[in-house]
Amino acid sequence: MTLREGIYAILRIARRELRRLVANPVYFFCMVVAPVGCLFFFTTLMRSGLPTDLPVAVVDLDNTPTSRRLVRQLDAFEQTAVRMQCASFDEARHEMQQGSIYGVFLIPKNFQQDATSGKRPRLSFYTNGSFLIAGSLMFRDMKTLSVLAGASVGLQQGQARGMTDAQIMGQIQPITVDTHAIGNPWLNYSVYLSNAMLPGLLQLLVFIVTVYSIGAEIKQRTSRRWLSLGNDSLAVSLAGKLLPHTVIFTVVGLLICAVLYGYNAFPLASGWLPILAAMTLLVIASQAVGVFMIGVLPTVRLGLSFASLFGMLGFSICGLSYPVTAMYPPFHALSYLYPLRHYLLIYIDQALNGRALAYTWGEYVWLAAFFLLPLTIYRNLKRALLYFHYIP
């Protein structure tokens, strides 16, 4: 078959595939509605970047000007809102168990008297660790307030003893800590989650659609007709069938990038080209993995189960929620079998850190290497398309 004949065959199959896409609304939902809907869901859900005004209760057993000033300072934090003042800790604990509040700040009796007399009173705070983000933010604000309260008491005691401000600060804070959040200085959770969840969801949908589209040919017994349109060449037939999918998924992926880095102005230190190239390679590499899945299990039912399970595990194994280097060695090795893993490494290096391309070219090679994966099941898939008897 000449090159010209191959191109004509690819275009012929692509037109046939477009008719199949239009005829089945499942494709439209999985390829357009689901990813675009999730895009706007994530970008609107975390529009402010961090949750604000999380409810907290205060148990003020001292009720002095000093304790009331602490309550006002706690309420002034952006993430914290003092919604109730309880008479006892048991009452506050009951409210936390009901889910009305995320934290409790306890000021003991005689706090002002003990603080000014040098008896080192103890401030206690409790956070609900069942809610990871809310509990972490509560813990940070309450701990910061406790440190500031201790420094304020130390400052008052030093001034009463006639010490200078420089002498007092040398005792209160002998070492100054200068902290910088690299890549995401705003601590914006949307920057952290959206740039990983949305490509991960796109990868999962590419797995599912690729497996379903090829498996449906076997189920509906149209696979031989499909192969004959490609002059009995599996490579040509796959190229023609997946070409419309590639275009649609790539456009959706580029839309995701446009909304994240254009409209929302998320960090993009190295410019558009590296991240757009990574998104395009992510789509094609995910299609190659999908072809491998249906080649290993050439039925719609088993292939979709394989794609769903493997795709869902990718959200955890790729290092989104837990560092890959801290996983067991087999899972560490398994993470490199996901295109999403290499996309995330490119995103971190190029978009967040702005590193030179020389540090990241290996991840692009990894994504391109997935294109060779269908060769490992070439014979098995072609045999299934020609001779497999589908059993419902």
Image: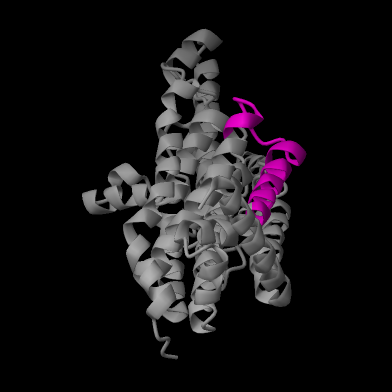
The answer to whether any part of residue 60 appears in the image is: no
Q: Nearer the viewer, residue 243 or 40?
A: 243
The residue lying at 53 percent from left, 18 percent from top is: 160
Q: Quadrant of residue 25?
A: bottom right
Q: Is residue 291 magenta?
A: no
Q: Nearer the viewer, residue 27 or 144?
A: 27
Q: How many marks?
A: 0
Q: Is residue 249 magenta?
A: yes
Spot the residue most to the front.
2
Q: Considering the whole magenta stretch, tell me its main secondary structure.
A: helix
Task: Indicate whether 336 appears above or below 96.
Answer: above
Q: Nearer the viewer, residue 211 or 84?
A: 211
Q: Position of residue 232 (x, y in %)?
A: 48, 65
The residue lying at 62 percent from left, 34 percent from top is: 186
Which quadrant holds the C terminus? bottom left
The residue lying at 45 percent from left, 41 percent from top is: 368
Q: Position of residue 187 (x, y in %)?
A: 58, 38
Task: Indicate whether 279 appears above or below 180.
Answer: below
The answer to whether any part of residue 11 appears in the image is: yes
Q: Is residue 129 left or right of residue 184?
A: left
Q: Position of residue 13 (x, y in %)?
A: 62, 63
Q: Which residues are magenta?
A: 247-274
Q: Position of residue 199 (x, y in %)?
A: 56, 51
